Image (cartoon, helix red, strand yellow):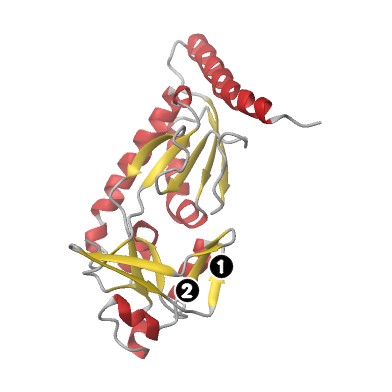
């Protein structure tokens, strides 16, 4: 047996209501002194593994009665159909019914490569020079992201790049770049630590890549519980501190 499409929509509506009822009961029992409950969170593999995971550790230390279930995958989770309370994702959600809480609204993609790659290959003075380089591709589902877009003031530029490596895991693409296999086109918050450590260098810093705002997504406004609001505040604070150091991580601004 399986749910009909109407049943799936009904279940998606009921799940946050039941979660809210449970949380209200917990708050009543605890006198509002203990934040508790279950949170199932989906997030990108690279950002989640290397940045967000330790911030969730801090959050759980502060609120030990919260139980976390984390899903790290670059595939976009369906917060309506899957057993997921929240999703951390880049870009404006295509479904206008979703609630999108901004975490890093002013974020964009950058070109970067390892110092060894830069030393041993032709200079990259303009995005058009990418056609002379090996580019490292990211694939989501059947979509290959090989059209890279840039802006310098009012000027726009798009280039179809070529390369010999493709992965559906953003962490793999970043690691290939660190190992000197080519140039990657990544969210600047994903590569900030590598740039600060000298593992990667920013290329064509005057050309800004595509916007990549980061959001905390949920299916319904009723799901924005006190626990979710506390988590968002915690992540916002950590990302604000993290972003403050981006300008020190090479020429990131």
Q: CA distance from mark 1 to mark 2?
A: 8 Å
* Near-viewer residue (149 or 99): 149
Q: Position of residue 114 (x, y in %)?
A: 38, 77
Q: Is residue 155 above or below residue 68?
A: below
Q: Secondary structure at mark 2?
A: strand
Residue at the spot 44% in from the left edge and 74% down from the top edge = 177
Q: Quadrant of residue 194?
A: bottom left
Determine whether, in the image, residue 206 is placed left or right of residue 69. Answer: left
Q: Secondary structure at mark 1?
A: strand
Determine whether, in the image, residue 230 is placed left or right of residue 9. Answer: left
Q: Is residue 67 visible?
A: yes
Quadrant, the N terminus = top right
Q: Is residue 136 above or below residue 154?
A: below
Q: Is residue 199 visible?
A: no
Q: Position of residue 39 (x, y in %)?
A: 54, 32
Q: How many marks?
A: 2
Q: Of all residues shown, which one is farthest toward the left?
A: 153
Q: Position of residue 70 (x, y in %)?
A: 56, 43
* Near-viewer residue (210 or 117): 210
Q: Of all residues shown, which one is farthest toward the right?
A: 1
Q: Is residue 139 above or below residue 40?
A: below
Marks 1/2 in contact by CB < 8 Å: the verdict is: yes
* Mark 1 neighbour density, 10 Å: few (under 14) some (14–19) many (20 or more): some
**Residue 136's mark?**
2
Residue at the spot 59% in from the left edge and 58% down from the top edge = 141
Quadrant, the C terminus = bottom left
Residue at the spot 33% in from the left edge and 40% down from the top edge = 236
Determine whether, in the image, residue 42 is placed left or right of residue 243. Answer: right
- What residue is shown with label 1? 167
């Amino acid at each position: 047996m399986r749910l009909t499409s109407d049943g799936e929509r009904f279940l998606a509506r009921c799940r946050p209501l039941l979660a809210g009822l449970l949380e209200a009961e917990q708050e009543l029992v605890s006198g509002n002194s203990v934040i508790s409950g279950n949170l199932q969170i989906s997030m990108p593999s690279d950002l989640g593994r290397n940045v967000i995971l330790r911030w969730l550790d801090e959050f759980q230390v502060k609120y030990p009665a919260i139980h976390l279930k984390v899903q790290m995958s670059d595939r976009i989770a369906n917060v309506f159909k899957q057993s997921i309370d929240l999703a951390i994702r880049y870009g404006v959600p295509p479904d206008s019914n979703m609630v999108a809480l901004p975490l890093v609204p002013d974020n964009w993609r950058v070109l970067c490569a390892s110092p060894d790659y830069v030393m041993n290959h032709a200079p990259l003075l303009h995005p058009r020079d990418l056609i002379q380089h090996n580019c490292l591709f990211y694939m989501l589902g059947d979509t290959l992201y090989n059209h890279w877009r840039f802006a310098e003031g009012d000027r726009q530029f798009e280039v179809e790049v070529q390369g010999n490596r493709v992965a559906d895991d953003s962490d793999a693409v970043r690691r290939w770049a660190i190992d000197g296999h080519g140039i990657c086109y990544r969210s600047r918050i994903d590569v900030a630590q590598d740039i600060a450590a000298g593992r990667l260098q920013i290329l064509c810093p005057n050309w800004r890549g595509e916007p990549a705002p980061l959001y905390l997504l949920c299916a319904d406004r009723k799901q924005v519980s006190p626990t979710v609001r506390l988590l968002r505040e915690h992540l916002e604070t950590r990302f604000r501190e993290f972003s403050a150091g981006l300008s020190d991580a090479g020429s990131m601004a």
